[in-house]
Image (cartoon, helix red, strand yellow):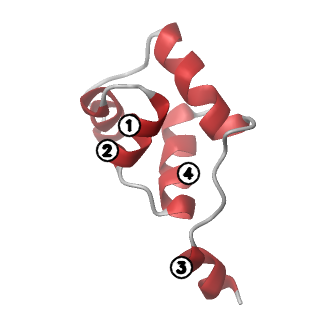
Amino acid sequence: MDITKDIRALLHETGWSIRNFARESGVDHACIARLLNGTRKGLHSSSIEKLWPYLYGDKRPAPSPRQTDDAA
């Protein structure tokens, strides 16, 4: 499991910004941004618990219509 890769994939698939994802998940956007730009190596377990349902569970959003149109 590579949480950074999985966050990037989620953002790409959904069209969410880092701020949207942070607002939805309750994790500070700066923390997510630092993880994605490589200035942070990992996350606290409490942050992972908040992100998990969006990345791997029941709160995973559907792909954006833009992505759906591209696939057709």
Q: Residue at x 48, y 31 (%)?
A: 25
Q: Nearer the viewer, mark 4 or mark 3?
A: 3
* Type of amino acid at the residue the image marks with label 4: Leu
Q: Do residues under tags 1 and 2 come within 8 Å of each other at their CB atoms? A: yes
Tag of residue 66: 3
* Type of amino acid at the residue the image marks with label 1: Arg
Can you say which quadrant of the picture contains the N terminus?
top right
From this viewpoint, which residue is outermost toward the bottom? 72
Label 2 CA crowd tier, 10 Å (few <14, some 14–19, many 20+): some
Tag of residue 38: none
Which comes before the other along the chain, label 1 or label 4? 4
Can you say which quadrant of the picture contains the C terminus?
bottom right
Q: Do residues under tags 4 and 3 come within 8 Å of each other at their CB atoms? A: no
Question: In the figure, residue 3 lies in which quadrant?
Answer: top right
Which comes before the other along the chain, label 4 or label 3? 4
Towards the viewer: 24 or 49: 24
The answer to whether 61 is drawn above or below residue 43 in the figure is below
Q: Which residue is mark 4?
A: 10
Q: Do residues under tags 1 and 4 come within 8 Å of each other at their CB atoms? A: no
Q: Which residue is mark 2?
A: 19
